[in-house]
Amino acid sequence: MSQVKISQGRGRTDARPSRVADMFVNTIPENARSDPKYSFTGTFGEPINVVSNSAMMQSNLQIPVYQYMVEFNPPLDIKKVRRGIVYDKFKDELGSHFIFDGTTLFSPNRIDDKTVMVDHTYQDSTTKHSVFIKMTGKVFLNSLEFNRVLNLLINKSLRKLDYVEIGRSHYDMKQPIKLQNHPLQFLKGYSTSAIDCDAGVCLTTDVSFRLVHTSNILNKIFDLKNNLSRRRLNPNDLRTEYRKEVADMLVGAIISTSYNDKHYKISSISFDESPKSTFEARGKEISYIQYYKQHYNVDIKDHDQILLVHEPNARERRSGLRSSIKLVPELCLLTGMTDAIRRDMGLMRDLDQYTKEGPGPRVRGIQDLFRKLKSNPEIVKEWNYWGLQVPNDLLNIKARRLPAVTVSFNPDAKSAPFQYNRDKCDWGAMFRGQPLKETVALNDFLYIYSSRDAQNANEFYKHLVNVGRPLGIQFGNCQKLELQQAYAKNILQEINNNITPRTNMVFVILPDQNSARYVAIKNRLCVENRPIPSQCVTSRVISRPKGIQSVATKVMLQVNVKLGGDIWYIDFPKRTQKMMVCGIDSYHDTSSPKRSVCGFVASLNYTFSRYHSRVCFQTHGQEIADGLYTCFDRALEEYAKVNREYPESVVVFRDGVGDGMLNLVKTVEVAALNRVIEEKARKIELAVVVVNKRINQRFFISENNRLENPKPGTVVDNTVTRQMLRLGFFLVPQCTRQGTVTPTYYNIVHNTTFLDPDKFQSLAFKLCHLYYNWPGTIRVPAPCQYAHKIAFLVGQYLHAIPRDELANNLYYL
């Protein structure tokens, strides 16, 4: 028997780095645990009790678990077949309750390394495979890697209940819920995760929904073609726009195959291939038409359709899948939301009735899953084998509710500060006739519209003036430009012919939602010479008399912010007056599959209402550091220019990263920020906080014998947090009128500032009130949302770095 290194502590011992360990990066300072002044939890706020969607999952298994690597040669792509072969060949030695994910196997039983030969028959072809199993280490109870064992056990149990895994959730495919009057149905299921928390290993369970289209993807492509044909584009533009819109609709989407109910994420579109194209299968060339007929008895009707491409992800490559998979649109169904669905308000209302479950139904759904697990003798036996019991009760946790935040408008006017209604978290109605904190006059601006929309455009302009003047916005020279044809080239020509050095805003009433026109306008006014803030509104929005006053108010508020004005403000402690807050977020650049855009914003004033905004492109880790270094350096210089001194402290809120990237943030991004501070030769304190909003954790409060959503300002920093590894807390910053509110998790990965947990929590909550595109609270601090907005604008439309002249305005709202 070959020598195997045995783990003496926590986790795995094989050479491949542990993905589990990456999620448990320790960010607590080394001397913190021995320092009695170092606090891990806060005390500020009203104590309350909440119910979570987590339950204890402790194992009393007394023996170690052996971990094995399993390899198939030649590789066998079908995971279900691999599981069946391993179960058949090794169940006598490993026991029937071993756990196998396709490449890694866990069992309390110890066997020697060995190779066995198996015959795999598929259709009329038989292939010999060697199956090699080798022990790679031990996994002990309460180790990080044991969490992986528990998660695999849960997934195995859900498969026994006939749930199908799609992404990171499991769904009931046998009972789809059909939407009346819509070609859609959705699946109901669960997302689960077992992870080490302060209370021990917790099983977090949430109800999940997945939308499935009943019309195949080929029909959707035909619909898209028909819509494009009505726009009368020339052949070259038609071909370009067709490929762009197909890619926008499908790349990144999860599709379901009708012939075997498998799910794939679309990586790209092969426009130059069709079902008539051939590929090599078992040493022979075969067309896709022949392949699907022979293997699935499916006749492909359209032989000229394009093909969809799925590239194997890291998990699939570890399971043995090496080559890309080509899929036929005619045989695929789209899953998930699309932009067309989001724009259909009637459909969204129908969906919300089913998918936005309130706290009561959501908890009952979780308890129903526990009952299903308990009622299956095979599952109960397997859990007992691993020293586990199916949970009974959800955790009750001590929480706190932070005080309500006071919002103010204009300190010089007679507008008194007020506290908003926590059941609504919306102060939009307060703007009617309310002078704003600081306004910027529309000295000279263009107002462009088509002849078709002339009447609505002129009426809307009157509404803009009527709502703008009471807000304190002064109107100067308005140059109205009516176009016979509102093509992109015509709009750009009018802009170039009429802008002057005094022009400070360009309004455009767009005849439709044509993205090419919008891209052309934004590129001209953001990237090219003489950049100017702009405001685009579609004619559909201004054509409906109902609510037009509200639309005009929102537009004027947005215009004032884009020009550099303030709308409202809140009070911050005196010690934060020399603090800079920053936001970082990333967005995939749709023009380049290997490039993403990093948005960076930094506050310039003590009320955190003015920001310096930049972007950088990144393709790998070093460019993240280089781009971040430049953005932070320029932001500090701009702060010093405005305030005549550098900030005393900087708090960076980093959005767009998961637990698996914490080590990258800690070792690369924090190092880049510290390098800038060191080169300034100034004493600037730094804190970096990772903001994670894609979480399964939920909290509920019991009121009048029923479960309700917690109020905004609810903080949880114990029991289901991981204070043994890093300082962190959950915050519920906003309310929801339908469904269940989702908290945001804050992970403090670096801190040399004066901020303690109470101050971090209060700062984060207050910053959620300062996003000027929404008169209410949002899920993340305003700097994060601003960083997302500029990264989205550049990654989705501009694909180039905006001009520096706009950097101190929120022109991207």
Image: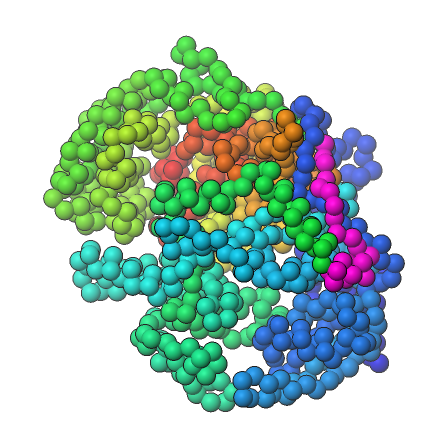
26 sits to left or right of 689: right
Q: Residue at x 19, y 29 (%)?
A: 459
Front residue of 648 and 176:
176
Quadrant containing the N terminus in the rendered view: bottom right
Residue name at image x 79 percent, y 79 percent: 113
Can see residue 765? no
> x%, y% of residue 181?
36, 50
Q: Is residue 167 above or below residue 726?
A: below
Residue at 29% from the left image edge and 43% from the top image edge: 525
Q: Nearer the viewer, residue 79 or 779?
A: 79
Q: Is residue 301 above or below residue 575?
A: below
Q: Can you give x and y, in whole percent of width and height, for residue 487 in the image?
A: 18, 49
Depth order, front residue of 575/266: 266
Residue depicted at x 59% and y 42%: 362
For the magenta stretch, what is the residue range?
377-398
> Is residue 337 rendered magenta in the image?
no
Residue 175 seen: yes
